Amino acid sequence: MSKHIVVFQPDGACVEVDSGTTILEAASAAGVSIDSACGGQGTCGKCKVLLALGRPGGSPGDRLSREEIEQGFLLACQATVEDDLVVEIPLESQRGEFQILMGQGQLDDDMIQAGIPLAERIGLELEAPQPGGRGGDDERLLSALRRLRADSFQDFAIDLGALRALPQTARDQDWKLDLLLADVDGRATVFGVEPAGSAESYGLAVDVGTTTVVVHLIDLHTAGFLDACASLNDQAAYGADVISRIIYTQEHKQGLAELREAVLNTINRCLAEVAGNHGIRAEQIIAAACVGNTVMTHLLLGIDPAAIRRDPYVPAVRSLPTLRAGEIGLAINPAAPVYLASCVSSYVGGDITAGVLATGMAESPRLTLFIDLGTNGEMVIGHEDWLMCCSCSAGPAFEGSGLEYGMYATIGAMERVAYHPDADEVEYTTIGDGKPRGICGSGLVDVLATLLRAGVIDRAGRINLGLPTPRVRVRNERPEFVLLWGEEVGRADDISLGEDEIQNLMRSKSAVFAGAEVLLDSLGLNALNVERILVAGAFGNYLDAENALLIGLLPDVPLERIRFVGNSAVAGARLALLGQEARQRVAELSRRMTNFELSVLPGYMDRYVAGLFLPHTDLSLFPSVAKKLELKP
Amino acid sequence: MSKHIVVFQPDGACVEVDSGTTILEAASAAGVSIDSACGGQGTCGKCKVLLALGRPGGSPGDRLSREEIEQGFLLACQATVEDDLVVEIPLESQRGEFQILMGQGQLDDDMIQAGIPLAERIGLELEAPQPGGRGGDDERLLSALRRLRADSFQDFAIDLGALRALPQTARDQDWKLDLLLADVDGRATVFGVEPAGSAESYGLAVDVGTTTVVVHLIDLHTAGFLDACASLNDQAAYGADVISRIIYTQEHKQGLAELREAVLNTINRCLAEVAGNHGIRAEQIIAAACVGNTVMTHLLLGIDPAAIRRDPYVPAVRSLPTLRAGEIGLAINPAAPVYLASCVSSYVGGDITAGVLATGMAESPRLTLFIDLGTNGEMVIGHEDWLMCCSCSAGPAFEGSGLEYGMYATIGAMERVAYHPDADEVEYTTIGDGKPRGICGSGLVDVLATLLRAGVIDRAGRINLGLPTPRVRVRNERPEFVLLWGEEVGRADDISLGEDEIQNLMRSKSAVFAGAEVLLDSLGLNALNVERILVAGAFGNYLDAENALLIGLLPDVPLERIRFVGNSAVAGARLALLGQEARQRVAELSRRMTNFELSVLPGYMDRYVAGLFLPHTDLSLFPSVAKKLELKP
């Protein structure tokens, strides 16, 4: 039997297999995950790949259109290896190690469907009580429930509230009920008894960010995404970063209570908005999975975070039991279970454990660097065998915070921006094609890169005021560049970016880059050892990898190794909302990840200062960028 | 080796053993339980027995006083069988199948000490966080707790409230803490974090009776009884029996809430009194074990009991999860666990399962009839292999309710009463030797018996108005007998019992006796098959078995087979408060006991009517009483 080599792109993984092996089997042997819902039957069409080189055997599969077949697509489970092949795996066919698509947390359907959700609404018909029977309604409910869920749970309980509702509801409804069932740390707990079929059920995936709170509304019945709302965290009024918030709690008697209320108000406002959009009542929201950094987790629960900034810098709490909405203050069904993702350390929180879960990097053989840029920049490096993480203070600039025209990535945010100096025109797109209201993170990366390329700013981020364009101007003693003339879109003011704001963004990107550099160094690695860089955060729906490299935000690796994974935290929250396995894996990740304190690693500050250039003071770290900008390394 | 017979009194159990066997071993072989804390080492002195006949070997043991030895006492573990013996086991040396002493629920110390209490306050020193450590305070707490309680629990959790208290308290106290730890359905749950050694901890054993609520205050540290309070259940204003209470909940919109509040107020008033007596704050009471009949259990929790009186007469709830004081409304530490004993059926409740536990009859080989006479009369018959139970409506007369001078068994209640017609004197003792305030259950039994013996009342309970004593009189058109002249004790009024009240008591006793009769009949048994009758209830500290037989309250068995066990319900509640095994056994009992509906058994009403005589219409059922009263059967 002859052997052939198969190369999988874009990752370049290679494997030698016997002829006759399916491409799906070859991928598996190469450690490359391809989606396949039907288990290789050729019926689901999910394992679609693109043939780049070579002549496969088998058939392309019935599920493809003629057009797809002409373009070279085939089903990996149907096509066989009869030749050396190069196969490209489209994004939508990848799975496992890369769960997230961009945007609003669309996740692999199989992964979601398989799980035991944090809460569910299930229909159940109780046996009617028999003459001579003595069993309580509670027991008949539990025995019916056990029959239904014996494969998921061993331990069952009924809340007092549900017990109170049970006798009347059961008799009114002729023993046909809907139960609200929660997974409370492995115990199946009935927390509601309602008439059968009376209403749908919904859950929330919540990313509790220092600067921005993001709430996703999920239909628990279909596991589908319904709506999202993002809002500035009301806590921002108490300090921009977690340290100033901690200080506030220490210096004000009611500080902890105030901050708790602020973030609760923010979440409750967001959830009221998404619920209102869909005509959903608060009681119909029966579960919430929240992820946040360690300080946000403490503040949301009213747990004193003071120890986090006191030697030896440990959190009060790393892992939380399943709580109830009522005891926290979430304005949903008060008995609804609330999950909080476990943290790794004082500065690597549940948003990161959940994010790592969502990327699948912890199950991948490939060395991956995961960077989540929010108000803090957290980094995780590793693969299936080990994971290291650290955190650096990036500040909220790339979330749009602290910039006059910065904004969170939502409707009307300029998300792609390019300046064409010859025509003196700025080309842009906005999220939702709305009227431009400001610039979000991805747009800010683009702006820095395009202004650097056009020579509007120099490598130190200073605006060249001598340029012959009215876009370069001084307003209120501040040099700035006008991205959009207000009159073009009927705005009273122009949308601009000031030199001080550019400096602010450069400090952010340098903090992140220096963190990655020091982390790699301490492991004896360099950027080129990294097989994949996954970038998460509040940039928006998109991040231009070339521009991110150009400004020195990310280590200089071949572009195809960089992938933007959107808000991985909220995606992880959604997975935790929908699956027991995901919740268990987050808990494992919090124990498994090794934490580095950047502050104790040598050279961080030096490297941070050296990074306050575009792309960097040391061009030898950015050879491809130097080449592109025709700079001498 | 020669053989000898040993007879154990008062039960008459016999066994043949080899000479040289200890009396303790012989007792074990005879199925008789003798207390022995030291395991037969001769050091604890608990296995003290009285030699009635025969000549034992071995030594009487070092732990006995010369006086005790002269009286014939010896330690069963030290004395050996060298002769045929008759040995009497004093009440205090019995154990296992007979846990309760009279009065305020004194229980076998070993049984109490062995258990895992519902809640406890335990001292714990946490590891201080280490430089470079990242583990949360929560994890260091849990790992210290696991080391301490690994043999009791597999599953550990911390409540949100405790997590909130943890970081500050731990640092203020240099990591030395007291934890409040609850057994929440098998999961060890930290519900409080306090400075080490700051306060004691207490628990409540609560008997939620239809007519009377009894609250015992228990020191959880020593497992010792501290105080008790009994109060008329405020629900009595809504109807004397459970049926009228259920009807109230159905006919009034807020009825269920009102009744819940009434019983809560009663319990809270009682616990405030006992706590106040000992200078204990509500927060220091960290656990409560409540037992009540099925309707009381529903009403206390605000669960609709309507189904109980609707065909097919099933309860909404038979078994309850461990709840928290706050969610129920008990005015103790709001996070404190509250245990509720599981019920058997709509009319045999948690007071009975707990009571059976406390009597130990479920582990005894001896056929036992257990009668708990409260507002309902419940009966359980059986032994270690089977248990049957039923309930009859006795009414609260023997609790003193509905009688002008009836009262609950508390200070000042006339508990023993005897009328001497020759001197026209009534001899009595009161509980606590207090000034007489009324008559409690045991006194009422005595009164009926002594008046019958003296010919003051006839067998139909009618007062003989022709007697030449001023104690017999008509007041407000009611024939009555004066038990106590007010002037004798400085009262404005006399304490008397009216003919109508005597009829009321006779209805109660007849309901109980008819129940026992029908239950025995349906099992093909007669009274003499019953090896032991245990009588529980609100009679007081004492019940005169002979008088109870005389009035026909109990089946006519040899007197020594009858034992009064006091308030077995509250004793069972105390066991459940103090031991996990007790809680598990109550749950098992609720499933194990077979429920008879008296209403479906033939002849109950006929027998009830036949029982409205003293002792009974059918004297063949009471041969010993007939002989004593010189009546012709």
Image (spheres, coloured by chain):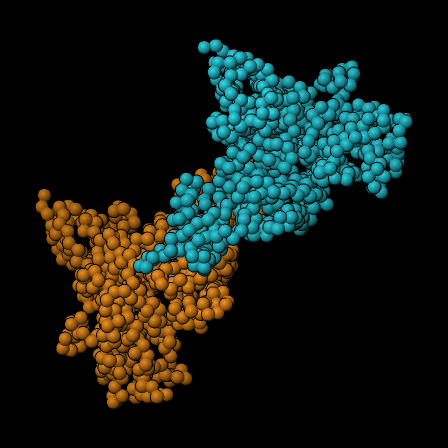
Chain colours: A orange, B cyan
Q: Is A352 situated left or right of A464 in this image?
A: right
- Left or right placement of residue A549 versus residue A204 in this view: left
Residue B625 rendering spot, x and y as whole percentages? 74, 19
Residue A390, percent from left and from top: 29, 62
Q: Please state the horizontal and vertical placement of residue B163, each as a whole percent of the image.
A: 45, 55
| Quadrant of the snapshot with the C terminus of chain A | bottom left
Which residue is rendered at x = 45% and y = 67% of the image?
A249
Q: Tell me which corner region of the image, top left, top right, bottom left or bottom right, holds residue B497.
A: top right
The residue closer to the viewer here, B418 or A462, is B418
- Picture coordinates of residue A530 (x, y %)? 20, 61
Q: Residue at x 77, y 32 (%)?
A: B428
B217 to the left or right of A266: right
Q: Quadrant of the N terminus of chain A?
A: top left
**What residue is drawn where x is 51% and y is 41%?**
B117
User: Where is A438 relative to B421, above or below?
Assistant: below
Relative to residue A77, is residue A546 depicted above or below? Answer: below
Q: Nearer the viewer, residue B7 or A617?
A: B7
Residue B547, quarter of the rendered image: top right
Residue at image location 40% in from the left, 55% down from the top:
B137
A56 vs B411, nearest the viewer: B411
